[in-house]
Image: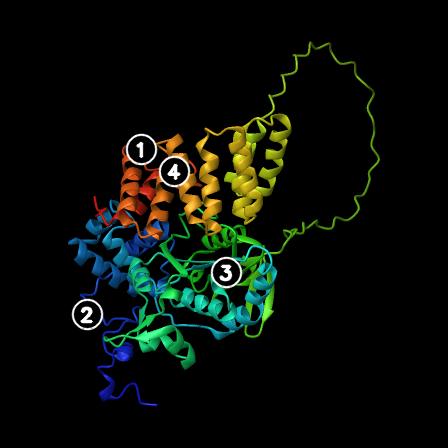
Amino acid sequence: MADPFSSDQSNNPDLRLYQPGYDGLHRTDVRAELPKQALSSFDYERFRAFIQERIGLDVTEDRKMIMARALAEGMQTSMSNTLDEFYRFLTLSSNTSPVWDQLVSALTVGETYFFRNTAHFDALAKEILPRILADREHLSRRVRIWSAGCATGEEPYSVAILLSELIPNLDSWNISIFATDINREALQKARDGLYGAWSFRGVERRIQETYFRLNSERQYAIAEKIKRMVTFGYFNLVSDPYPSLANNTNAMDVILCRNVTIYFRAEVTQRVLSNFYRCLTPGGWLVPGAAEPNMLYYNEFEPCNFPGAVIYQRTVTPKVKPTFVPFAPPAIVQPVVVPAPVPAPMVKLAPLPKPPAPRDAYELALELLQAGKADEALVKLYEKLDQDATFVPTYFTLGKIFANKGNLEEAQSWCERAIKKDKLDPEPYFTLSMVYQQNGLNEMAMESLKKAIYLDRNFVMAHYNLAHLYQAENDFVAARKELQNVLRLLEGKPKDMTVPEGDGLVVGRLVELVQEQLGTDTKK
């Protein structure tokens, strides 16, 4: 093997990481020297807190120099003269602005390669995925996987290749691989699907020759059939709502989140893992990185040991957390002297207050859903059905819960019952459309969304989801029209207002998503 440090290797694009100026952050480009930006303790702490609040990243003390460099880059891009000026600029910028993208890119490590950590992929290939496929072979033939923190795409594409190797009749299955990240630069590279030789270290040559082709620029382009298996999207694990039927984060069989939570503080990590637990179907799997926090953070899961890896499973029935009752020694009983009774004066008692009226079961169910307690919400919804079988929202809310759990047959049944009771209510058509979409029935999903919009022209999420379906059908003119409808309907609404049927999505975040997809400049 040639010495990577020898002078005749200096022009090799795949060995640029050994050159001067490479800072260990970007494996795809060598960055020019920037003026060093000194950080006082005050500036470090306020930027650290602000960045954590916005995107969840905790820039610890050992990465202070990385933050200094990232802020220096941001000051140049935003033409800010001082850190105070740059701080004000960031507070007025949305998370989709180019400066935020640049900041995220500088603070997150995008280094990855195909089939990284072979122990994880061996467990997936030999144990986990074969079990899932065997269970679904004669049932739904549906598999849902989420790569949370996908960087430049090597991880989700590796999963897609693995599935294509395991399933001989791939076209007869409904495979969904959802890949997300907060680094938009990395996401664009992932969508392009072009890689250098360095991304294939440790990969057997047969895989490289079968699923990639070398183009004229000496880059390896991933096969179109593999590329089509993966859907990429921006997602913030700290601020975006999940699990959610609306953003495709529900009913996952496998979630890979490797070397992501190492950037989060303990309380954020705990919240993210709890959300992942609810995103998984019963029996689903969470694959963390080798450097993730200790097992105390995974106490809702069952740890499973595989050769060289620990992977966590959501049990079919929730784990019961033991309650600790401290041992108390027997009390020493002292004799009690009872005084002679003294007659009490006559007191006129005030009338007892009337007990509060019982809360509506449907309202209680919505509150439980908001708190992430879906099973308790089901109990209240069934209670509401017993009280009033004509109340249509109960039916389509049941449909949404079952869809989030991955029980699409039950979800479809409840939505259809809602429509049968009231054909003019748009919401069951909306939920039914997402059930169809997760079953791979895009045409039926589009028809349901069009019915929902016909019944309610101001149904924001119906327009938004219809735009996504048009994009999937490569009808970009119709998709753009629907996205513009979303912006028109949200105009003037408070940014922190919750979008109906958005599962916690707020107006400001939806506007950012739409503007990003339209390619408009969101800088104010």
Three-letter amino acid code at the position of disc 1: Lys
| Residue contact at pointers 4 and 1, CB within 8 angstroms | no
Name which of mark 2 and mark 3 comes first in the sequence.
Answer: 2
Q: In this figure, which residue is indicated by the disc labeled 3?
A: 172
- Name the spot of residue 482 as percent of width and height, x first: 30, 41
Q: In this figure, which residue is indicated by the disc labeled 2?
A: 33
How has the structure been colored for display? rainbow
Three-letter amino acid code at the position of disc 4: Lys
Q: In front of the other: label 1 or label 2?
A: 1
Quarter where residue 27 is shown: bottom left
Task: Pick the quarter of the image with the N terminus.
Answer: bottom left
Name which of mark 4 and mark 3 comes first in the sequence.
Answer: 3
Of 255 and 223, the residue lying toward us: 223
CA separation in Å, label 2 and label 3: 52 Å
Task: Pick the quarter of the image with the C terminus.
Answer: top left
CA separation in Å, label 4 and label 3: 27 Å
**Label number found at residue 493:** 1
Of 124 and 110, the residue lying toward us: 124
